[in-house]
Structure formats: C-alpha cells, structure tokens
Image (spheres, rainbow, N blue to C red):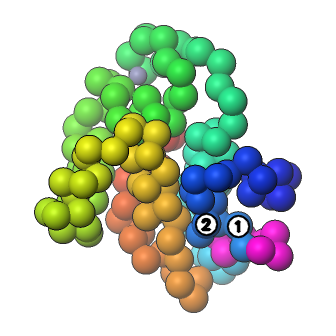
Amino acid sequence: MVKRLKDRDPWGVTAHVIETNGYSPLWLIAKDNKKLLALCKTLMNGIGLLISNQFKQICKLCNLRTGSPIIHKLCYCTAIEAEREKLWTLILETCGIDDFKRFIQISAFEQCVSILKLGSETSQKHFLHLDIAVSICKLLH
Ligand SMILES: [Zn+2]
C-alpha cells in the first residue's frame, strides 16, 4: 500500500509521510501521542486521495459536483470558506508574502500538494507546522 502510493506520486506530495524504507514518520508520532492519531490518518488519507484517480462526486457540504474532493475542500468549497481562510492565513504567515504570491499563482492541484507537504512535515516525532496540519484536517474532515 505504502509503496503503491509512492509509485503514483511524481509530485512528491508523499515526501514527508513515506520514507524510502516504506515506513511513515506520522505513525511514529501517532504511536507516542494518541491524540494525534486521527490527524495523522486524515493527512495520510488526504494525500492518498489527492494522488489517486477520482470519479466525479457530489460534495456533501455544498452539493456541487467535484472532481477531486481534496482540491475542492482545500481550494473551492463554499461551505467551509471561513475555515479555509484560516488555513490560507497560516500559510501566508508561515511562507511569507513573496512565497505566498508565487503560491497563489500555481494550479489548484499544485497548491494542494504544497499544502499537504507543509502540513505533513515532521522532525523528530513532531509536526513542524502543527497549526497547519490541524487546519487541513478541519477542512478534510
Ligand atoms: Zn463543497
């Protein structure tokens, strides 16, 4: 499963969640801190969904037909606009205005790749941007 995800990921969105030996730093975090288990699962599922083929489906929140539910929720869904604004503010604060200006010019798919990479980045069993990870999970939940 882990290797299959990695093979389908030319964009590098799995960079922080699957290491070359196939294990995930997120599970190490979840093992030590059960409160973060749901967050780790949501991030992993979101990354898996983003890079897998999607059939069109109806968003349960806004009733629009969507391609990728991940792109829809992180970039477009009107039902969760306030929460998404919080996420994008965190991204701006984390990246700085120059990187943020470049960020908003890339495609929605690439934005989702960048957001999920930022949110899943860890170091020594800690999330580097826990506030962003939490915000992503509120949107994807
Ligand atoms: Zn929606």
Asked which quadrant contains residue 72, the reply is: top left
Residue sitting at x 38%, y 39%: 107
Disc 1 residue crowd, few under 14, some 14–19, many 20+, Cα 10 Å: some
23 in magenta: yes
Residue 60 in the image: above or below residue 87 = above
Q: Is residue 62 left or right of residue 35?
A: left
Q: Is residue 2 left or right of residue 61?
A: right
Residue 79 in the image: above or below residue 84 = above
Residue sitting at x 66%, y 80%: 32
Residue sitting at x 39%, y 47%: 111
- Using the image, tell me which numbered label, if any, was put on residue 74: none
For label 2, the residue is 15
Instruction: Check disc 2 and report its element: helix, strand or loop.
Output: loop
Residue sitting at x 26%, y 33%: 81
Disc 2 residue crowd, few under 14, some 14–19, many 20+, Cα 10 Å: some
Q: Main secondary structure of the magenta part?
A: loop
Q: Is residue 60 visible?
A: no
For label 1, the residue is 18
| Amino acid on which the number 1 mark rests in the picture | Ile
Disc 1 under 8 Å from ligand 1? The reply is: no
Q: From this viewpoint, which residue is outermost toward the left?
A: 97
Which quarter is ligand 1 in? Answer: top left
| Amino acid on which the number 2 mark rests in the picture | Ala
Instruction: Check disc 1 and report its element: helix, strand or loop.
Output: loop
Asked if marks 1 and 2 touch (Cβ < 8 Å), the reply is: yes
Front-most of 51 and 141?
Answer: 51
User: Distance of mark 1 from mark 2, alpha carbons?
Assistant: 6 Å
Span highlighted in magenta in the image: 20-26
Asked which quadrant contains residue 20, the reply is: bottom right
Residue 105 percent location from the top left of the image: 26, 44
Q: Is residue 91 left or right of residue 34?
A: left
Q: From this viewpoint, which residue is outermost toward the bottom?
A: 124
